[in-house]
Each structure stands twice: as C-alpha cells, then as structure tokens.
Amino acid sequence: MNGNQPYAYFEDRLIERFTRYARICTTSDRHAAETPSTAGQWELARMLAEELRALGIDDVEITQHCYVIARITGDSSLTPIGFLAHLDTAQDVSGHDVQVVAEKYNGSIITLNNGIVLDPAREEGLAAQQGRTIIHTDGTTLLGADDKAGIAEIVTAVEYLIAHPEIVRPPLEIIFSPDEETGKGLPELPLEKLRARFCYTLDGGGAPEVEAECFNAYAARVLFAGHVIHPGAARGRLVNAAAMAAYFITLLPRTESPEATDGYYGYYCVTDLTGNHETAAADIIVRDFERTGMERRLAALTAFARATEAAFPGGIVTVTTKSSYYNMKEKIDSAPQVLDKLRAAAHTLGLEIKFRPVRGGTDGSRLTELGIPTPNIWTGGRNFHSRAEWVSVNDMCLAVRLVIELVRCWGRVEDGTDKPVAK
C-alpha cells in the first residue's frame, strides 16, 4: 500500500476482524471475583495473541489473568508508547450469538427486532453515515463495539506498521485487558512488565472525539438486616429488609440519576437489588467529576442509611464503599506531550480533535492513576451497552489512521521524508 491508495484497504480488514471478534461472547460478570470473570475472554485473548504473532510480532504473551501484551521493537532512543483496548463486553444486554450486519447505509430508518429503531433524525451521527458502511446487530443482542471496535482498530494499525518498517517509530506496546466493564480497574495488570511511558485507549464514541477527563468512580454496597416474624404476628415486630432497601433507594435523588444528568453532572445508579424479609442488598455506582462532589455523595449514602434505620426501628443498614478509578484530568494535564502528539497527529489528517468528558471511565483512567497518562480515542461506536448499538466503519478507519499518525509523531523525523498515511 502506497501513500496515495484509498483506505478501503483498512475498511475491508476492519469489517472482517470486528465481525470475527464480535461473534465471540466475552460478556463479563461483575459478581465474579476472579480475573477474567468469564471464559469467553480467554478465547478472544488467545485468538488475538495468535493473530499478532501471525503478523510478525515475536514478543507476545498472555498473563495468568488474561492480559495480552505484545511488544513491537522501535528506536530505543525514543519514548515507548502503548495502545490499549478491552476484551469484555457489558452484561447489561446479552452478548451471546451476536448477529452482525454490515451494510452501506442509505439514509433511511433501520428497524431491528424487539421494536428497536435507528432513526437518523434521532441518532446522533447516523445521518452523516449516508453512503458509508455501518455495522449493527439484528436487535437481539448488543454489538460489542465497546470495545471490540477498539481492538480491531489497533490490530489493523499494527498490521500496517509491521508492513511498513520504514516508518520511524518508538518501541510500542499493545495491551488487551479483561473485565473493564466490571469496574475492577486493571486489578491484575502486571505493571512491572510495561515499558510504555504514555498510552492511548481506543474505547470512545464517534470521531473526532477524544476524552482526557472522566468521573471519579466509587462502588457502594448497602446491606440491610431486618427481623423476621410470621406476618400474622408482625405488628411492632417485623422489620422487612426488602422494604428497607426499597425505601433507601427512594432516597436517592431522581435528579441525580444517569437518566437525568449529562455533561459534568454526577449521579447515583443502582445496578443490583436483591432481598427478602431478613436480608437485602443493593449495589450502587457513584460518579462525580470533582473530589469534593464525590465526598458529598458518599456522605449522603451514610445519611440515607441512618434515615432508613430511623424509618424501620430495629433494622440495620451498613454501607461500604470502594474506589474504582479517579478523574484522569490532573495527571494528563501534567504531561502535555501526550495530548500535543494527539493534536499533531489529527492535524496531519485534517482533523480537529473535539475534547469531551467521558461520563464513565476506561482502563486508561486507572492506568493514568498508576502513572502512565492515557487519554481515550474514539472507536466510532454509539449506543454502547444496548441492542441499538452501532458503529461507523468510516470512523473506525479514521481511528486506525490516527494510531498510525500517532506512532509517526512519537518517532517524527523532521526532514520531510515521513509522509502521512493516505486520507
């Protein structure tokens, strides 16, 4: 492929790879303690390791906890960088037996199963895809663009770089991680194995969006202990733990829920609720961009617990919280070169980066916290975690080209001989 060839070269490879990856069920399980939480992630990890080896990368390993780490040699005098995407998909919607539909979009409404409609008048970015290829499902499952689109883009960029050894590059690391969707935050990543000083996740939405700040995230588990007695003799004696849990949840402000907020507004979100007369439990994720805002929210959970105990005399409510990840903005701001290179690479492609806060987190959030600044690049996917999920292949191609240009920028030769990949 020379510098003037159209990037249909990328499109064909992206569709084939993404379709193949999407058909492997890698739904993670937030209730499982082990990493990875599901067997399907091993299947995809092994497939990717073999694929990377087949492309000519000798240094590829799968760790005991299913992290795929591949290293591509480069100029050792340059700063090592990495690219990261995750293997798992969310358990909110089935990821089993995904039926992938790749079609040239004609601009009309797309009707899927389960009454799901993709309407260009309502779907942000869909109308712009007219005449281009998009990928979606039949509406019975999620698609898995989060984050198999990111994986396909990284592997396709790697294929191009391996085929073009003349491109001056720094040492590169490719990382595919398990259980991002469970919020574990890279718990078993062997950080001591990584050489990259800066990294980029491909786990975002539409082009040309980049995310360099995210929520602070906590997980809360609230336990309710009641007192059981026969309902016929319950007056003044029964303490219904299930009712306590329901009461507690009604205290969570509806105006501070995911469905009522956007932009920089944080929220509380109940993810699981179980219980009976004797015991009940609620799992709640808590999000806020500011540390002070998070402190307020965690204090509010404790206050809601005391209010519930007051409403149910004899009942006991216990709140435990655990940090999942912190806002990556401060540490990324302290390493301006990681975004400077990103802007330069995008400029070479005629793109102007649009920075937006991510209302969630990525493995890059945790990696940034651990000392490797890691902003997040688009994948082209929309409607993540839903049956209405779809991805723009054009945006996927742009992501591949951006990765290649990032490698060029980190290994830039300022003599005019290093030309950008075709537009």
Image: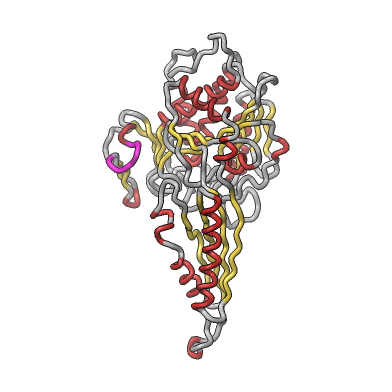
| Magenta span main SS | loop
Is 404 a magenta residue?
no
Q: In the image, 321: left or right of 258?
A: right
Total numbered labels placed on residues in the image: 0
Q: Residue furthest bottom?
A: 233
**Location of residue 48 (image quadrant):** top right
**Location of residue 302 (image quadrant):** bottom right
Closer to us: 19 or 162: 162
| Vertical comparison of 265 with 58: above or below | below
Q: In the image, 10: left or right of 221?
A: left
What is the x, y in percent for residue 228?
A: 56, 82
What is the x, y in percent for residue 206?
A: 42, 35
Residue at 51% of width from left, 13% of height from top? 419
| Vertical comparison of 69 with 144: above or below | above
Colouring mode (rainbow / by chain / secondary structure / one colour): secondary structure
Residue range corresponding to the magenta coloring? 121-126
Q: Residue furthest right?
A: 192
